[in-house]
Amino acid sequence: MSEQNESLVTIIGAVIAIIVGVILQIIFKLPIIVSIVVAILLGVFVGFLVYLIQNIINKRNNK
């Protein structure tokens, strides 16, 4: 995965995480800190997924 694709996936994941956090905040009338925590956790999850995808691609390229 090129750096440009990786950056694009990370940015899209962060935007989706923020949107999901705000939607949950509005639906359940939660404090803003909850949406911040949800956004951070989803951002970390997306970063982990990008890391896993990179490892899989690198293993295939090294064979």
Image (cartoon, grey):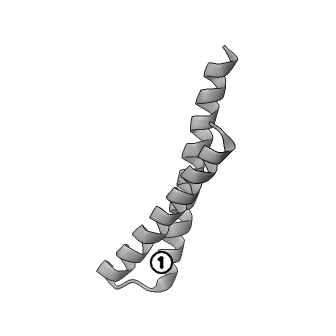
- Tag 1 secondary structure: helix
Q: Residues within 10 Å of mark 1 (few under 14, many from 20)?
A: some
- Quadrant of the drawing holding the C terminus: top right
Camera-side residue: 12 or 43?
12
- Quadrant of the drawing holding the N terminus: top right
Name the residue that disc number 1 marks. Answer: 34
Answer above or below: position of 17 versus 25.
above
Q: Residue at x 58, y 38 (%)?
A: 52
Coordinates of residue 59 in the picture (x, y in percent): 64, 23
Q: Residue at x 62, y 42 (%)?
A: 51
Coordinates of residue 24 in the picture (x, y in percent): 36, 74
Quarter occupied by residue 49:
top right
Relative to 34, is 29 on the left or the right?
Answer: left
Count of number-bearing discs: 1
Q: Amino acid at mark 1?
A: Val
Relative to 6, is 29 on the left or the right?
Answer: left
Relative to 59, is 17 on the left or the right?
Answer: left
Q: Residue at x 30, y 79 (%)?
A: 27
Coordinates of residue 42 in the picture (x, y in percent): 50, 60
